[in-house]
Amino acid sequence: MKYIDEYRDEKIAQSILKEINAISKKKVNLMEVCGTHTVVIFRNGIKKILPKNINLISGPGCPVCVTPISYIDEIIALSKKDNFIITTFGDMIKVPGSTSSLEREKANGADIRIVYSTLDALNIARNNPLKKVVFMGIGFETTSPTIASAILKAKEEKINNFSVLSVAKIMPPAMKSLLDVEEVNIDGFICPGHVSAIIGSDPYNFIASQYKVSCVICGFEPLDILQSIYMLIKQIEEGKAKVEIQYKRVVKPEGNKIALDKIKEVFKVIDSDWRGIGNIFLSGLEIKDKYRQFNARKFEVETEETKEPRGCRCGEVLRGVIIPPECSLFRKVCTPENPLGACMVSTEGTCAAYYKYN
Amino acid sequence: MCLAISGKIIKIFDDNTAEIEIGGIIKEVNLDLIPKVKIDDYVLLHAGFAIEIIDQKAALEIFNAWEGRIV
């Protein structure tokens, strides 16, 4: 397929790899922030072909993984109410809450439906006017304009039985938080390509200027990853720290203005809890009061006391402090069939990627 | 979850939606986030929305940079 197959060319991959080997001298840690990148890196065995002095660390860029248990409990409580339909992306359905999951509640009779798009959720609301249809609003900047778009359409068409429980998140503040905590020494970021299609490259500038950490915005095919690693290594070896775009076929420095305007119209930026990391200053999106009728937080629910699974080390995995095999639950009691932590649930979770490919 | 896939615009409808072709499969997409697309443009599809038009010139840069250096 065009824009996919040609970016998997073995000969070009070998050339880039040869250049990486030629210029790479320093021992470096590069973090791929995005869960989709994590999967591409594992699926193509990229970690194993790099020189030993280049270490790739997976970061917190899997929305399913960083969604707090309290939020899962909140949506489970909503699913138990009469006349509610919960709509969600498929990844969320197996994530364990404190004592249950949406999958279990669905088996118990709750009306929980997997959708591919926010527009599908809106359609369900349109077709079920007597039900309250709640969409689980998770995701980063790639997804939040699609949530904003659905809310704007709901307002325009007066689909008042549609609402969103938002835990949408913003990526650059989480990267800042990892640098501030200094648990892991990060020399360069492989920045998320599709988040950047929306936000552009400017929001990463502070990482290069204030923290002197190199950033390259990267596409999602093997050649994209290898070229981004080459660009990062070149910056680091030359003692430079700047923001570069490798994924130029999609990402513009200014991002997608229409999408950004929709986010700004519907959402306000708030402090937000990230599972495994904690509360991060101005890192989340909540629906503005102007659109409060579409905010599912208008429904009052009582949730149980939040319980993290005992022994689960997803938090340290998400911060890049440990790799999954260092967790005593990994592969023994925590598996994709019976996940205890969110990093094993999502196909883009670091634990799931290690389980499947390593 | 930020997965997106590229496809070619083959039909544009009045309600700001379009049909795109992805490796022989036809899918409907919403164009709210990139209203200026044309037939034959390649777009990036995420969760039912086209989120960006692919810059066909920039797409070649990687090959121009590396093809002469093949080992």
Image: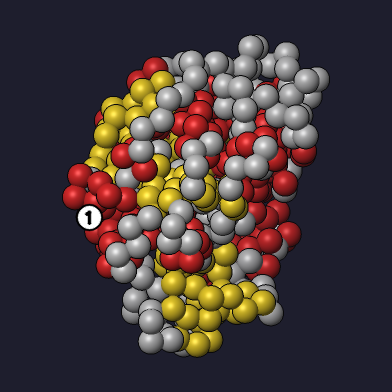
Number of disc labels: 1
Residue A61: image location, x then y, percent = 50, 38
Name the residue that disc number 1 marks.
A265
* Residue type at numbered disc 1: Glu
Residue at the image point whose x is 41% and y is 30% from the top: A301
Left or right, B68 with respect to A161, comes to right
For the residue labelled by badge 1, is the local secondary structure a helix, a strand or a loop? helix
Position of residue A224 relative to residue B8, above or below, is above
Colour scheme of the rendered structure: secondary structure
Q: Quadrant of residue A42?
A: top right
Residue A140: image location, x then y, percent = 43, 45
Left or right, B9 with respect to A180, comes to right
Decide if residue A66 is in sight here: no
The residue nearer to you, when weighing A168 against A235, is A168
Residue at the image point whose x is 49% and y is 32% from the top: A77
Left or right, A48 with respect to A265, comes to right
Position of residue A327 relative to residue A210, above or below, is above
Residue A332: image location, x then y, percent = 80, 20
Residue at the image point whose x is 25% and y is 46% from the top: A292
Residue A112: image location, x then y, percent = 58, 47
